[in-house]
Image (cartoon, rainbow, N blue to C red):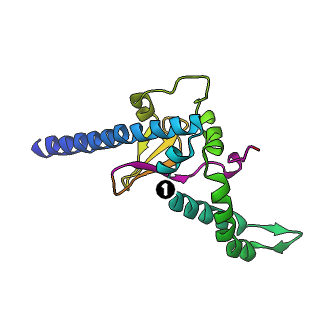
Amino acid sequence: MLKRLVLFGLLGLVAACATASRLDAASDVHALLVAIRDGDRAAFDARVDREALKAEIASRLARETSRLKVDGLDLGRLGVVAAPALASLAGDALIQPGVFRQVAEAYGYSRDKPLPGTVAIASRLKAMPDGRVCATFEKDGPCTLIFTRSAEGRWRLSGFEGDLTSLKIRL
């Protein structure tokens, strides 16, 4: 009986920590949404871990291009070699407020609607086992946007697990 009480207590503590992380991250996610809505590049950059995001995009491009075949010719090795350079170019072009505005709009956040508060944002975040949090489209859906706590304590966008084709540059 005592073991069960201790186990339930530990589970409650873990759940409370996960909720605290989500609430803490939600205020930085809200600030990121404000920067995206307002097109504020400086505020956006302060809330994005550009190097982590570029590395993640490079890894995904390498995985995607490793499966490239044209007329039976396997271009996978070429894609793996070219992915880091492509990711660097794409990262510079894609990691900007206007591009991520489209992602925010897919979540239902638009310029003509007020942004939700931190509690509402926290309800859309999911604690990950490694201490990061992520945003999902559905309650138990897969992670789309990943946030990592920086050394200074700010949660920053560090990963994008959504469809890469949804990241479009508006001219």
Residue 39 in which image quadrant: top right
Question: Could you tell me which residue is drawn at 45 percent across and 50 percent down?
Answer: 156
**Is residue 100 highlighted in magenta?**
no
Front one among 73 and 147: 147
Question: Could you tell me which residue is drawn at 33 percent across and 51 percent down?
Answer: 153
Residue 13 on image: x %, y %: 22, 42
Residue 16 on image: x %, y %: 27, 39
Residue 35 makes an appearance in the image: yes
Q: Residue furthest left?
A: 2
Residue 117 on image: x %, y %: 43, 27
* Quarter of the figure with the C terminus: top right
* Residue segment shown in magenta: 153-170
Does 119 sit above or below residue 29? Answer: above
Q: Amino acid under label 1?
A: Asp
What residue sits right under mark 1 in the picture? 49
Residue 144 makes an appearance in the image: no
